[in-house]
Image (cartoon, grey):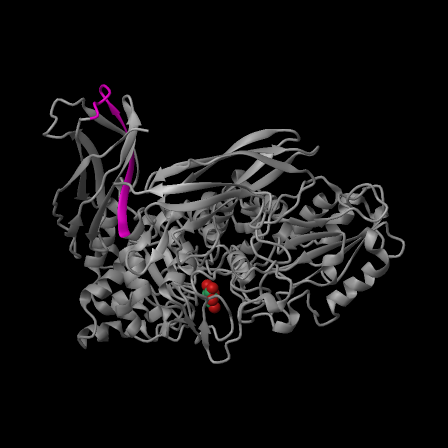
Amino acid sequence: MIRKAIGVLMILTAASFALPVIPTTLDSVKVPAKIIKGSGVNWTGKVTYYLSVGDNDSLQIVLSIAPASTTPTAPTCTVTKTSGDAGIYPMITGLNGKREIFFECTFASAPAASDQYVATVTVTPNMSANEQLARSVLAAIPNNTEKAKILCGGNGVAPAQHDAFCTGDMNGGTYGTVVGLSTCDGPHGINGWGWGQATMFPCNGTTANAWDTALTYQIGQAIAQEAKGLWQGRFQLLGPMLNLVRDPRGGRDYETFGEDPYLMGKLASVDIRGIQSEKIVATPKHFLCNDQERDRTQASMNIDTVTMRQTYAYPFEMTIREAGAWGLMAAYNKVNGVLCTENSFLLNTILKKEWGFRGLTISDWSTMMTVAAGNAGLDVQMPENTVYSKLPAEITGGRMTQDVLDEKVLRVLRAKAWAGCMTTYPKTIGGYTIQQLHDGAGGINHQLIADTAAHRSIVLLKNDIPAGAAKPILPIDRTKTVAVVGPYANILRVGGNGQYTSSKVKPFESELVNTPLQAITRKLGAAKITTDINAADYIVVVVGIASDEGTTSAAYEGQDRPDATLSIPDNGAQDQNVYVQGILATKKDRTIVVLTGGAAVTSGAWYTANAVIYAGYGGEKQGIALADILVGDYNPCGKLTITFPVNQTDLPTFTNADQYVPYEKANEGRGYPYYLFAKKAPLIPFGFGLSYTTFTYSALNVPSTAYIGDKLQVTVNVTNSGATDGVEIVQLYISQKTPVANRPVKQLRGFARVPLKAGQSAPVTFNLKEWDFAHWTLASGWIVDPNSTYEISVGKNSMDNAALTSTITMLPAD
Ligand code: BGC
C-alpha cells in the first residue's frame, strides 16, 4: 500500500445573513489532518479537522484537492465522492468533536511519489430554509412569556386540548399560532394513554434478538406513522430507550435493546432513522444511567467518566452522531449527585458541544427539577409548567440570559420547521387511521412488520435429543397431539402492562386471538390439541416473567424484579419452577419450555428441559411465530442480547438502599465482559441462539496492520452446513491486548444477519473504523493507542470457543 501525506489548509468563508438573532460566527479552527492512500489515478482518503462553532450554525462543508505550490505541475485531482461531515453539516462524525470527511478522488494521471497536494475544506454558514424559518419565527415572538409557553407542559393551560403530552401554543406574531410540541410514547408501539389501540410490535428487548437493522428501521418508521394518527397528530415520539440492561432485575430491561452498548447504538440508530424518515422527532431516553427503577427519581448513579463514556453514554453518542436524533430525554435520576435535568456536564458539555446535538432536550415526566435546569441545557419541561413558566423571571432577575432562552425556543422551532409542523399537527399518509395502517391500507401494512419481527426475534436456547430418540425434540411432528399449558399459554403478553407504564401498547381486538394456545390450535387443527398432559405427545409449557403493574414478581416501569424471583418466579398463582419441575419429572422427553418475559432468568428446573425457547415479549404476532417455529415452518434465528446468569450470586451488587448506586469500573464491564473479567461462566452467553440447521465459519481475513483512522475490512466465510435453510447472526468482537487499556476485556464491534440456503456459503464483510478500536481517556477523550494490538474474533456468540481469531496492530497514522 502506498501512503502519502497531504497538507491541509482550511479556508473559512465568512457570510452574513439578514435574519440571525443568534450569532453565526465560527469561533475557532484548528487544522491537523491528512491521510490518503491508493495507486494509479484512483485514491481514497480522510481529512480530519476541528471546528468549534456556535450551537446554532448550519454549515456548508466542501472539500477540494489541488496541487501544492511546491509541485504546481502535478496532475489535477477531482474529488468524486465524500461522506462524513461533507455537505450540509448535521452532525459530528469524528471522535472527540473532531470532524472528518472521507473522500474518493481521481487524478488526471497517476501522481508521482514526490507530488504534494493541498486539501481545502471550505466552511460556509449556509442556512437552510428551515433554519431561516425557525429563526424568523423566533424573531417574531412578542415576548418571553410567549416563548416559555412552548417550552413547558400545557397542563391546566387553555386551550383544553393540551394534554399531559403537549406543550403550550405560542403566539408567533406574524406567523400566527405556533402549535405545541405534541408527543407520545413509546418504544415498541404508540401508547395512547387511553386514546386508543395500535400495532403492538415486540418490545425492543425482544426485537434486539433479531439483530436486524433493516427490520428495526421499518418498525421505527411504522410507529412514527401511527403516532401521526393519534388524536392531535403526535410530532415527537418518546423513544427509543437506550439505558443498558445492567442487571436482570432492572424493571425496564424489556424496553431497551439489550446489554451491549454497540448493539444498542446500532439498533437504536436505525430505529431513529426509521422514525425520523417520517419527519417525527425521535427521543433517545433516558440520558443517563436510568438503569434501574428503584428510587428512579432520586438515586444518584455514581460512575467514573471513563465507564460512563465507554459504556453508558456510548449508545447515546452513536445515535446523536450517526443518526442525528432530533430529541433527547433527560433521565429522572442523578448522575454523580446532580439531577440529569440540571446536569450541565451531560447536556451542555457532552451532548450539545462535543456531540454537536442540534435538537431539543426534554425532561422525563414530572422530574423533580428546578430553574437550575434552564442554564444546564434542558430545553423543555414536561408535563408541568411549574418551573419553565418562570424562565422569563430568571431573565429579568439576571440569573439567565436572553440567549439561553432563545436557544431553547430555537431548538424547538428548528425541529418544527424540519417536520413541517410549525402551525399544524402532523397527519397520517393518506389520512389513514391507525387501524388502517395496521391492516394494510395504501400499501402500508404494519401487522406484516410485526409478524416478521415476532418470527425473527425468537431464540432457540436448547434443543436436545430426548432419551431413546434419534433427533432433537424440535421441530415437533405435526401429526401428533399437543398440550399447550402454563400460566401464559393463553394470553397475549404485553411488556409493561399497566395504567402508568409508558411503554404499554394496547393491541387491536383482531390480534387478541394470537395467544400461543390459539395460534398453535389454528396451526395444527383443534383435533390435535389436548388439555390432558398425560395423553399429549408434546407438552408446550409457557412460563415467564410478568410485566403487569401491581404483581410482586413482575418487572415494569417503576418496579425492579425482587431478588427472590430471579429464576422464573412465583407469579402469584404458583411457583413456576416447581410447576415446570412437576411436568419434567415424568414427561421430560416430550416437554418444550417457552419462556416469555423481558429479561434473563437464572438457572432452574426450566433449564433441564430438552427444548427451551426464549420468546421474550414478542408483540401481537408472538403466538403465530411460536407455532411456526414449533412445527418447523420457520427456522429460529434469533440470538440473545442479554447474558443469562447461573444464579444471583454471579451478579454484581444491585442493592442501593442508601440511594447511591456505585457503578463498576471501566475494565470490569457489565454483561458478558463482566463474566469474562470475573472468570465466571454464565448459564447462557450473550449472543447465543440455536437453529434447526448448523453453520460453519472459515477463512477469517484480518489485515495484520492498519493505520489508525483508516477504514478497514474483515471478512469471513460462513456456510450453512445443515439440511435446512436458515439465518446465521455472525458476531465480531475485539479485545485490546497491548497496551493494557482501561476498557472492557471484550467488545462487540460488528454483526451481520446472514440468510443462507442449506449448503450455501457466503462471504461476510465487516467494515471497522477508528471508533471501533478506541477507548476513552480522561486526558485525550477517545484514542486508539499507537501500535496497539487487538485480538479480533468472529464467532457465533460472545463466548464461542470455536470462534475464528486473528490479531491486528494499529499503526500511527502520521
Ligand atoms: C417515563 C418515560 C416516558 C414518560 C412519558 C415517564 O414516566 O420514564 O419513559 O416517556 O413517562 O410517558
Vertical comparison of 166 with 694: above or below: below
- Residue at the farthest top position: 109
Left or right, 524 with respect to 121, comes to right
Highlighted range, magenta: 97-113
Left or right, 8 with respect to 468, comes to left
- Residue at the farthest right position: 535
Q: Nearer the viewer, residue 668 or 410?
A: 668
Q: Nearer the viewer, residue 670 or 120?
A: 670
Q: Quarter of the image holding residue 232?
A: bottom left
Residue lying at 57% horizontally and 56% vertically, measured from the top left = 642
Where residue 594 appears, as percent x and y from the top left, is: 71, 55
Vertical comparison of 40 with 800: above or below: above
Residue lying at 20% horizontally and 58% vertically, measured from the top left = 140
Q: Nearer the viewer, residue 70 or 385?
A: 70
Q: Quarter of the image holding residue 303?
A: bottom left
On the rendered image, what quadrant is the C terminus found in?
top left
255 part of magenta stretch: no
Q: Is residue 711 visible?
A: no
Where residue 165 appears, as percent x and y from the top left, is: 43, 64
Question: Count the marks: how many?
Answer: 0
On the rendered image, what quadrant is the N terminus found in?
top left
Where residue 169 appears, as percent x and y from the top left, is: 33, 63
Left or right, 280 with respect to 196, comes to left
Q: Is residue 557 visible?
A: yes
Where residue 517 appears, as percent x and y from the top left, is: 75, 53
112 part of magenta stretch: yes
Residue lying at 44% horizontally and 74% vertically, measured from the top left = 297
Residue lying at 54% horizontally and 46% vertically, measured from the top left = 211
